[in-house]
Amino acid sequence: MRWRILALLSAVFIGLVVLTGVMHAAADYDHQTLANQLGAQQITMPTAAALKGMAQVDVDALAPYAGQPMTTGGQAEAYADHYIAVHLREMGKTYSQASAAARTNPKDAQAAALEQTVFQGTTLRSMLLNAWGWSQVGDDVALGSWVMAGLALVTWLAFMFELVVAPRYPRTAL
């Protein structure tokens, strides 16, 4: 019976170690890809001067990243929700509303320009929030890899107990 317990603990330990490695590699890939893709866009977070006149909640979200190149999901979320979204709201129309106004009067250059600007802002905001979402997935997978490592350690300790400590005590009949 003991050899079965040892074999099971060995298999579980090996499985957990492999799973830990796979999950950690996936999290690293996610974070590295995100940093590469965001970095390639060469977006610089707004400086303190650009935040003047904005609501305090927006300033508080953006201030820790002021002037930095955007390379993380947290930066992407702050920029999307506290910079782009603020400017889109200031334009006074959603993309749907701006598009409808531009279609209603196709010769109105100002309406067409507003439609284009709102579309571009909305699209960039959407892409940055998507990047932030994937950074959250990577963070969760990284956390899961540490949980798997902890479970592997517990399994290894159980294996060592069964191998070293348990044989010292004679079996008792029930």
Image (cartoon, rainbow, N blue to C red):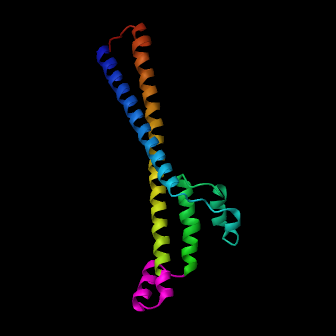
Q: Which of 40 and 132 is in front in this view?
A: 40
Q: Which of 96 and 57 is in front in this view?
A: 96
Residue drawn at (57%, 73%) of the image: 87
Residue drawn at (63%, 55%) of the image: 68
**What segment is highlighted magenta in the picture?**
92-114
Residue drawn at (45%, 26%) of the image: 154
Q: Is residue 108 magenta?
A: yes
Q: Is residue 85 left or right of residue 58?
A: left
Residue 8, image x, y percentages: 31, 23
Q: Does the magenta stretch include residue 104?
A: yes
Indicate the quadrant containing the C terminus: top left, top right, bottom left or bottom right. Answer: top left
Above/below status of 148 relative to 109? above
Residue 33, image x, y percentages: 45, 48
Q: Nearer the viewer, residue 36 or 141?
A: 36
Above/below status of 51 relative to 93? above
Q: Is residue 144 left or right of residue 53?
A: left
